[in-house]
Image (tube, rainbow, N blue to C red):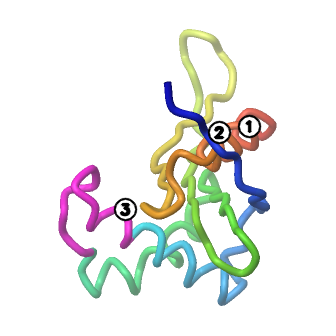
Amino acid sequence: MSETTTLSATIVRADYNDPKHAADIVSMLRSYAMDPMGGGEDLSGQVQRDLVPGLQAMPAASSILAYIGDEVVGLANLMTTFSSFAAKPLLNIHDIAVSKDHRGHGIGRKLFDEIHKIA
């Protein structure tokens, strides 16, 4: 049985107007895209350029970031929508990623804990 070491990560709701947050969103999504789980290819320059402005233009979009110190190690992009069957808001987890070097240390769980709070 393997043991999981939980790292002390700080979870923040991204501010799309904050240049560091914007760069970190692109960096984490690029890392995820280049991973075999994300398709193994980098995001195009156009996607990298338009990603954060596109998220910002969508009133239903929000993002959360995980940091260890100043290093971004996790990302979740979320979309609020509406469940017709439940007749109430629904939070869709569109992307969730943890950097390769920090997987297995509880960061994904911390992202999900924050998503639960938002929902």
Closer to us: 26 or 109: 109
Q: Residue furthest front?
A: 1
Q: What residue sits 48% from the left and 69% below the top?
A: 28
- From the image, give the main secondary structure of the stretch colored magenta: helix
Residue 16, position in %: x, y? Answer: 66, 76
The C terminus sits in image quarter: top right
Q: How many marks?
A: 3
Which stretch appears magenta? Answer: 30-42
Per the image, label 2 sits on a secondary structure element best described as helix
Is residue 26 at all visible to an observer of this figure?
A: yes
Q: What residue sits 22% from the left and 55% below the top?
A: 36
Q: Give the label on residue 32, or none.
A: 3
At label 2, counting other C-alpha atoms closer than 10 Å, the crowd grade (few under 14, some 14-19, many 20 or more) is: few
Per the image, label 3 sits on a secondary structure element best described as helix
Is residue 11 at all visible to an observer of this figure?
A: no
**Residues under numbered marks 1 and 2 in contact, where contact means CB atoms less than 8 Å apart:** yes
The alpha-carbon separation of the residues under discs 3 and 1 comes to 20 Å
Residue wearing tag 2 = 109
Q: What residue sits 57% from the left and 53% below the top?
A: 76
The alpha-carbon separation of the residues under discs 1 and 2 comes to 6 Å
Amino acid identity at mark 3: Tyr
Magenta stretch: includes residue 34: yes
The alpha-carbon separation of the residues under discs 3 and 2 comes to 17 Å
Residue 93, position in %: x, y? Answer: 52, 41
Give whichever of discs 3 and 1 has the lower sequence position: 3
Give whichever of discs 3 and 2 has the lower sequence position: 3
In the visual, does 89 lie left or right of 94? right
Residue wearing tag 1 = 113
